[in-house]
């Protein structure tokens, strides 16, 4: 079996790790990735040490089902990065990138020992078409490649430019890596950060670490900041589980949002907590003043309540399964609270929250909601919002791509697959395979919920694809693809032309 993996970020690492654990017949793997930062993807490349992993180690394992895999690798490395409020190590993302690299290289070595042949091709795949029993791929250098199975691990979409500011002097369209983009920002300049999510937090914290003295404003339609992680507790959900959701589906033939609320209500009742009070506190985040909310969240890091902890865990573990069972009317209900849902499911770490609160209290940082427009004119950026208008010297785009958006670099390949009839674009975004020899891992997988950024979710998808590949080891003709006689790890670099 010859497998082509397009992309070499976290999704590809999860797939390789799962293949190394499950594949019992040797074959060949070709990984296509033009970036020099193999296995790290966009989020975990070299950057400032202030750009932290935004989650504790237990939810960052790229090995499905092994919650201690990342923590075991981290070991003493995490000692210098302990978040005292969370009592867990929170390391720079570049260090997490080293973990992904180690995991990928270990998986490749294991596969090689088992007789697999591996190639790394440093060129972008621009086209693919079904050919006989497999795939014919074309890379940007004009070369052709053949494979039996094709796995797309292309990562998240390209950040949008909602106000059309691209090309304007002083506009930063994509902030990562912050080590490069913030280097040219004058220390006393007035900065508009477009967005108020985790990327915006990264920008603000990194500016503060570099000694920026000018005013910083978060520009947002909602003004909602990410919630704050709470210290982990020894609680495992007993009601909000995939097994309970599956049982409801068998009993009723359907699962509704009210059913899921009922499971959460039972979870809190068993812990002696008031569901109505928890729900009211949660929904208040959509209208409460951001500084007051942030202060309360930091004060509640050690609170013993399980409500937010259960939501944060199950949004990624149970959510994708439950989402597929919900009627569209209930999906619409949830989408109305998109910003709140992502704020809860993707919280910021306490050390960053403390920096944000300090800057807000000092007046250097402000949050402006109700932004209606931003325009570049006369060397500055003019913002129109509920408070009238204001101007800034620099605008940093911290707007995240919408869920399941197609990365710009992967556009030609996706277009070719759809034109070939091998895949379909999902109405809500993403790609749905129409051929069993095509697999999608990560954010591009169509049909899932709008919360797609979890490493645990990527690892689960990768494991599922690996299991499917294992059951499809014979090619379409029924013959097995023989491994090469050398059994060596082959790292062949394709020369990029044009």
Image (spheres, rainbow, N blue to C red):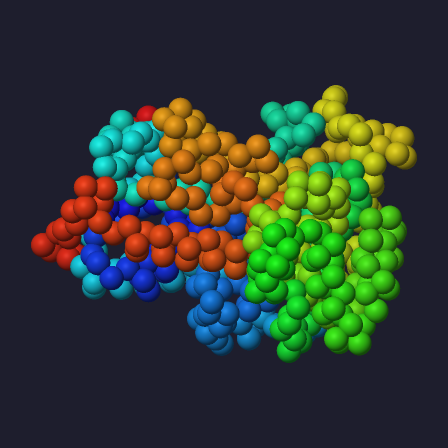
Outermost residue to the left: 485
Q: Is residue 234 visible?
A: yes
Q: Residue at x 69, y 58 (%)?
A: 260
Q: Residue at x 61, y 33 (%)?
A: 160
> In the figure, is residue 54 to the left or right of 137?
right
Q: Nearer the viewer, residue 96 or 468?
A: 468
> In the figure, is residue 299 to the left or right of 89?
right
> In the figure, is residue 192 to the left or right of 240?
right
Q: Nearer the viewer, residue 409 or 48?
A: 409
Q: Position of residue 134 (x, y in %)?
A: 25, 37
Q: Residue at x 74, y 25 (%)?
A: 375
Q: Position of residue 108 (x, y in %)?
A: 29, 58
Quadrant of the rendering where the C terminus is positioned: top left
Which quadrant holds residue 489? bottom left
Q: Nearer the viewer, residue 198 or 392?
A: 198
Q: Position of residue 473 (x, y in %)?
A: 25, 52
> In the figure, is residue 429 to the left or right of 419?
right
Q: Nearer the viewer, residue 439 or 81?
A: 439
Q: Residue at x 44, y 63 (%)?
A: 63
Outermost residue to the top: 378
Whether 448 is drawn above or below 233: the answer is above
Q: Position of residue 81 (x, y in %)?
A: 58, 69
Count of numbered circles on the image: 0
Q: Is residue 179 visible?
A: no
């Amino acid at each position: 079996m010859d497998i082509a993996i397009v992309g070499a970020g976290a999704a590809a690492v999860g797939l390789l790790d799962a293949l190394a654990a499950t594949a019992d017949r040797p074959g060949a793997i070709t990984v296509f990735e033009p970036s020099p930062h193999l296995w790290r993807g966009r989020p975990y490349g070299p950057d400032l040490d202030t750009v932290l992993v935004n989650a504790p180690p237990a939810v960052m394992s790229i090995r499905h089902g092994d919650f201690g895999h990342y923590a075991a690798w981290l070991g003493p490395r995490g000692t210098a990065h302990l978040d005292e409020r969370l009592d867990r190590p929170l390391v720079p993302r570049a260090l997490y990138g080293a973990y992904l690299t180690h995991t990928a290289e270990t998986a490749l070595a294991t596969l090689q020992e088992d007789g697999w042949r591996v190639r790394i091709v440093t060129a972008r795949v621009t086209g693919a078409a079904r050919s006989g029993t497999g795939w014919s791929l074309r890379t940007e250098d004009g070369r052709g490649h053949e494979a039996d199975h094709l796995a797309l691990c292309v990562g998240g979409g390209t950040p949008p430019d909602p106000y059309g500011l691209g090309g304007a002097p002083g506009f930063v369209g994509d902030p990562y890596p912050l080590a490069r983009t913030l280097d040219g920002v004058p220390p006393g300049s007035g900065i508009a950060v477009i967005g108020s999510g985790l990327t915006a937090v990264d920008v603000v914290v990194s500016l503060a670490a570099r000694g920026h003295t000018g005013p910083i404003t978060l520009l947002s339609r909602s003004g909602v900041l990410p919630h704050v992680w709470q210290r982990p507790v020894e609680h495992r959900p007993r009601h909000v589980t995939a097994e309970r959701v599956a049982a409801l589906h068998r009993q009723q033939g359907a699962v509704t949002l009210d059913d899921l609320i009922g499971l959460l209500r039972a979870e809190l009742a068993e812990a002696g907590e008031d569901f109505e009070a928890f729900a009211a506190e949660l929904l208040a985040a959509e209208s409460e003043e951001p500084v007051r909310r942030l202060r309360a969240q930091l004060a509640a890091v050690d609170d013993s309540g399980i409500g937010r902890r259960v939501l944060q865990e199950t949004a990624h573990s149970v959510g994708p399964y439950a989402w597929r069972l919900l009627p569209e009317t209930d999906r619409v209900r949830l989408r109305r609270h998109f910003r709140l849902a992502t704020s809860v499911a993707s919280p910021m770490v306490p050390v960053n929250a403390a920096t944000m609160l300090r800057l807000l209290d000092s007046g250097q940082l402000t949050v402006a909601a109700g932004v209606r427009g931003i325009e570049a004119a006369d060397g500055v950026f003019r913002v129109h919002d509920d408070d009238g208008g204001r101007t800034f010297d620099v605008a940093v785009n911290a707007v995240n791509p919408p869920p399941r958006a197609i990365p710009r670099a992967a556009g030609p390949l996706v277009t070719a697959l759809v034109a070939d009839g091998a895949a379909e674009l999902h109405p809500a975004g993403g790609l749905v395979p129409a051929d069993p020899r095509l697999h999608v891992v990560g954010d591009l997988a169509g049909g899932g919920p709008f919360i797609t950024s979890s490493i645990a979710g990527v690892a689960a998808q990768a494991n599922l694809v690996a299991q499917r590949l294992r059951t499809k080891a014979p090619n379409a003709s029924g013959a097995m693809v023989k491994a090469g006689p050398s059994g060596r790890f082959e790292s062949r670099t394709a020369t990029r032309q044009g």
